[in-house]
Amino acid sequence: MSENNKTPIEMYYTLSCPNCRNLQKMLDDVLPQYPDTFKFSKTLASAPVGMIKSMRLGIHSVPALVIDKKIAFRGVPAKQELINYLNQYKNGK
């Protein structure tokens, strides 16, 4: 599948956020199971562009995970909850 056809996952984070590091570790564990499904990116919420994007989406705290342009999780989900959510996209939502 080409990069253009992959579902975007965007993680909003800050450098001082311990929960952001936990979510990043979880995504590092889980996302390799979906090599053709998702395109992962990170947005630093405290940077100027990140602040604008966060405000537009209504993100007021980090971490936040935006999947397919919708806020999927605020905070760190349970690993199984994340996997269940991602599985919805595996067969082309």
Image (spheres, grey):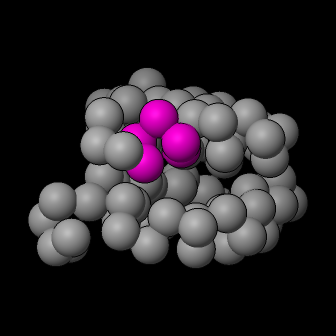
* Residue 90 visible in the displayed image: yes
**Looking at this rendering, what residue extends furthest in the front direction?**
91
Does the segment drawn in magenta span residue 46?
Answer: no
Q: Check the image and report above or below for 8 versus 83.
A: below
User: In this rendering, would 52 be left or right of 16?
Assistant: left
* Residue 50 visible in the displayed image: no
Q: How many marks?
A: 0
The residue drawn where x is 57% and y is 35% is 85
Q: Check the image and report above or below for 16 versus 8.
A: below
- Write the start and end of the magenta stretch as one range: 86-90
Q: Check the image and report above or below for 41 versus 64.
A: below
The image quadrant that residue 36 belongs to is bottom left
The image quadrant that residue 65 belongs to is top right
User: In this rendering, would 53 be left or right of 15?
Assistant: left
The residue drawn where x is 29% and y is 43% is 92
**Of the pair 75 and 89, the residue shown nearer to us:** 89
Residue 62's x, y, as percent? 66, 44
User: In this rendering, would 17 be left or right of 40?
Assistant: right
Residue 93's x, y, as percent? 30, 34
Residue 72's x, y, as percent? 52, 32
